[in-house]
Image (cartoon, rainbow, N blue to C red):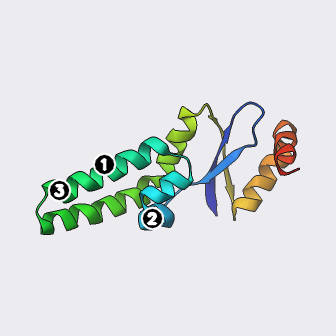
Amino acid sequence: MTSYTVHTRHHRPPVLLAEGWSWGAALLGPLWFLVHRAWISAVLFIALIVVVRLVMPQGVGDVIGLGLIVAAGLMGRDVLRWSLEQRGYALEHVLVARDHEGALGRLLHAREDLRHAYHEQIA
C-alpha cells in the first residue's frame, strides 16, 4: 500500500503524488523536474551540478554528485509538492491505496466536486 497526497486548485483536476523514493528524479535529475513543471527546482539542480563540477576536485565532485542523485530520489516528490503549492494548489487529503488508479478512484468516489473537474479534463 502506498500513501498519496491529493492537491487541488479551483476548477482544476486533482493531482495525486505518491510518497517515497522517486526513481525518475534520481535517474533523470533536472529533466524529471522540468517534465513535472518544477522549473525553479530544475534550474537550481542544474546550477548546483555545474558549480560542483567546476569547483570541486574530480573525486570529491563524484561523491557529491552521487549524493545529489540520492537527494533527488529521496526528496523529488516533496519538491513537486512545493512546486504545486507555488502554483496555487492546496494539500487536501492523504490517501492510502495499492496504486494511483485506486487512490484516484477512492478520491473521486468520496468527492463529487472533484469528480466533475476530473471528468471535464479528460473529456
Does 92 sit left or right of 63 as displayed? right
Residue 85, given in percent of the width and then of the height, sits at 56, 35
Q: Which mark is residue 28?
A: 2
Q: Which image quadrant: the N terminus? A: bottom right
| C-alpha gap between disc 3 and disc 2 | 21 Å
Residue 36, image x, y percentages: 56, 51
Q: Residue at x 48, y 67 (%)?
A: 23
Task: Give the amino acid type for the residue marked by disc 3 in the picture.
Answer: Leu
In the foreground, 69 or 33:
33
Left-right relation of 24 to 90: left
Residue on which the image places disc 3: 54
In the rendered image, residue 4, in percent from the top left (x then y), is placed at 63, 52
Q: Regarding mark 1 in the picture, which secondary structure is present there?
A: helix
Q: Which residue is mark 1?
A: 47
Tell me if 81 is positioned left or right of 97 in this view: left
Left or right of 91: which side holds 76? Answer: left
Of label 3 and label 2, which has the lower sequence position?
2
Tell me if mark 2 has few (under 14), some (14-19) or many (20+) residues whose alpha carbon lies within 10 angstroms of its own.
some
Q: Mark 2 against mark 1, which lies toward the viewer?
A: 1
Circle 3: element type: helix
